Image: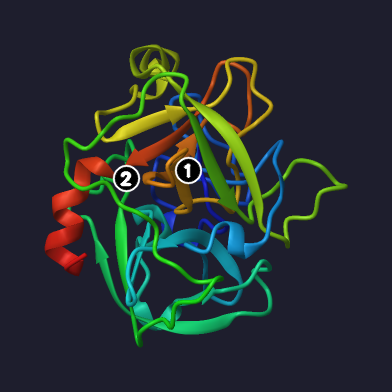
Amino acid sequence: MKLRFITLAALCLISVQARFLVEEQVTETTPRLDGRIVGGHKIKISDAPHQISLQTSSHICGGSIISKQWILTAAHCTHGKTPDRLKVRLGSSEYSRGGELIDVAEIVQHSQFNTSNVDYDYSLLKLSREIEFDETKQPANLPETKDDDTIKDGDSCYVTGWGRTQNIFERRTWLRQVEVPIFNHEECSEKYKRFGGVTERMICAGYIQGGKDACQGDSGGPMVNGDGVLVGVVSWGYGCARPEYPGIYSKVSYVRDWIRENSGV
């Protein structure tokens, strides 16, 4: 499988690959973490003002604004990194310019993050200063409680990011969005059985025929439902937009108390 972000530097010893850009040779028993928007369309940052680009020297992952000073992203995006290596670009439809860059002051990675099966793939970033909200910068709506989980199989959700598109005519420099339906958890776990299945911290979304998905570069980014609630964080999957293999997202409601305890949000 692929983890869904840009560079493997901090994960070279991890047996699962998140959704990132470098194609590594892996065995059939390892997940691949790779994140890009496949089969989607261009949008403006004002259409998803919670979206941010997590960067080192360039874009590596996505993330979501959840308050004036906190970002939610994936643990596999921050694993092995220190705050001084990271910046967040927000308020821009392009990851390479516009908006503003803010330094990361603190990383709060979930203590139960499991590198072998990408479980508890959550990380909080505290920014060095507060965000000034406007139409291009707004916090995502969070579930109220751990039990605030109203999504059902087939419900449409929306994933955004700057990941690879698998289409030479669709550049990844501009923010894109794709609509994907929630995929039955038990069926998804069966399809991913050779990778160890999916846990209760994970949500699957995508089409059985493939064609639309997150992919390399989208890791850590948001999946929101039709009501605009942040229900998932782009995490991992086998390839991108492959038939029979929906994308896998970290379930936000499951760690609602952890988010509150560590960020006050």
- Is 33 rendered above or below residue 31? below
Mark 2 belongs to which amino acid? Thr
- Is 101 rendered above or below residue 123? below
- x%, y% of residue 259? 20, 58
Mark 1 belongs to which amino acid? Gln
Give the spatial CA distance, label 2 vs label 1: 9 Å
Is residue 56 shown to the viewer in this render?
yes
Q: At 32% across and 70% down in the image, what residue appears?
A: 67
Q: Nearer the viewer, residue 103 or 175?
A: 175
Q: Secondary structure at mark 2?
A: loop
Does the residue at mark 2 contact the one at mark 1 (Cβ under 8 Å)?
Answer: no
Does residue 127 appear left or right of residue 30 in this picture?
left
- x%, y% of residue 244? 56, 16
- x%, y% of residue 213? 60, 35
Q: At 55% across and 57% down in the image, what residue appears?
A: 48
Which residue is the site of mark 1?
Answer: 17
Label 1: how many residues lie within 10 Å, few (<14), some (14-19) or many (20+)?
many
Q: At 42% across and 42% down in the image, what residue appears?
A: 227
Q: Nearer the viewer, residue 71 or 75?
A: 71
* Mark drawn on residue 214: none
**Marks 2 and 1, the one that precedes in the sequence:** 1
Which residue is the site of mark 2?
Answer: 115
Q: Secondary structure at mark 1?
A: loop
Does residue 32 appear left or right of residue 111 in this picture?
right
Where residue 207 sits, quadrant-wise, is top right
